[in-house]
Amino acid sequence: MAVSLSKVEQSAPALVNLYKTAGASVERRGLSGQRVAVYLVIDYSGSMKPYYKDGSVQALADRVLGLSAQLDDDGSVPVVFFSTEVDAQAEIELADHEGWIDRIVAGLGHMGRTSYHLAMDAVVKHYRASGTTAPALVLFQTDGGPINKGAAEQRLCEAAKLPIFWQFIGFGDPGSRQFDFLRKLDELAVPAKRPIDNAGFVHLGQDPRKVSDQKLYDLLLAELPGWLTAARAQGIAPQGPALQVPSGAAAAEQQPQRRGLWARLIGWLTRR
């Protein structure tokens, strides 16, 4: 359900290479022909100032827009900025992506602390109001843990009943204890805590722009096929086109990313 290459060339020529690279990752992950609504959640807490200043946030927004154009056909991505509260909700579009982050941030106020759960509430509310029948991929960027861990964990577990996959993205020192909570969310027990594994976590380091486009897209899509298969099997996500199982080198490359999720999925399917 991708936006056509010609439309990207006409409305956002600077994103053509990102669009093509994202398309290759979509194909490697067996997701060609799938329709997935893409959301972007961006941390606006005080510690994020350097990442706004050096262009890392704008670069992420551009890369997400390139990916969304391969997974959906509307050419736009709903974006939630959050800190202590939800600071802004807007949409970034292909034709208006250049400098978009700076324009939005110019109208925002004080950079607060970090409340995951309020941003998650905003995404769920938007998804429900949209009326879409497509599953959703939420790319949730942050540079630290939340001020209310219990609320964040509760929201994630409640959202496991919805066709929404939460891919958390860390900016910052990989060795920081700030990311221990996100690793915990990634590994919350199934089914004791939630009916399905609906979250992943990737860390992009202190200079996220240095992560290649191909690597970034492969990381962001690594767990989506397994989640989508399991969500359809449990009736959480609507049925859709069959995923295209990678073969040969692509399958071998994907294997390390499968981790416990695929093992649990295979075990669940074989027990049916």
Image (cartoon, rainbow, N blue to C red):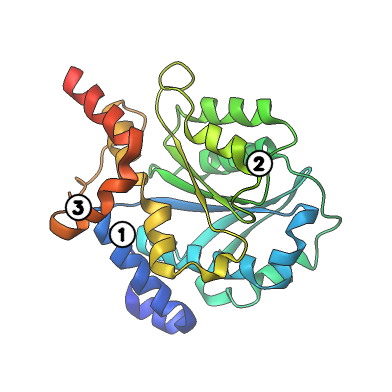
Circle 2 residues within 10 Å: few <14, some 14–19, many ≥20: few
Label 3 or label 2, whichever comes before in sequence order: 2
Labelled disc at residue 251: 3
Circle 1 residues within 10 Å: few <14, some 14–19, many ≥20: many
Labelled disc at residue 26: 1
Say what amino acid the circle numbered 1 marks: Val
Residue 98, horizontal then vertical, whole percent: 60, 78
- Looking at the image, which residue sits at the far front? 175
Q: Where does label 2 land, which residue?
A: 177
**In this rendering, the label closer to the viewer, 2 or 1:** 2
Q: Quadrant of residue 117?
A: top right
Q: Is mark 3 on a helix, strand or loop?
A: helix
Q: Is mark 1 on a helix, strand or loop?
A: helix
Residue positioned 75% across, 36% down in the render: 147
| Residue 31 appearing in the image | no
Gap between marks 3 and 2 measured at Cα: 33 Å
Residue 128, horizontal then vertical, whole percent: 52, 38
* 162, above or below 25, in the image: above
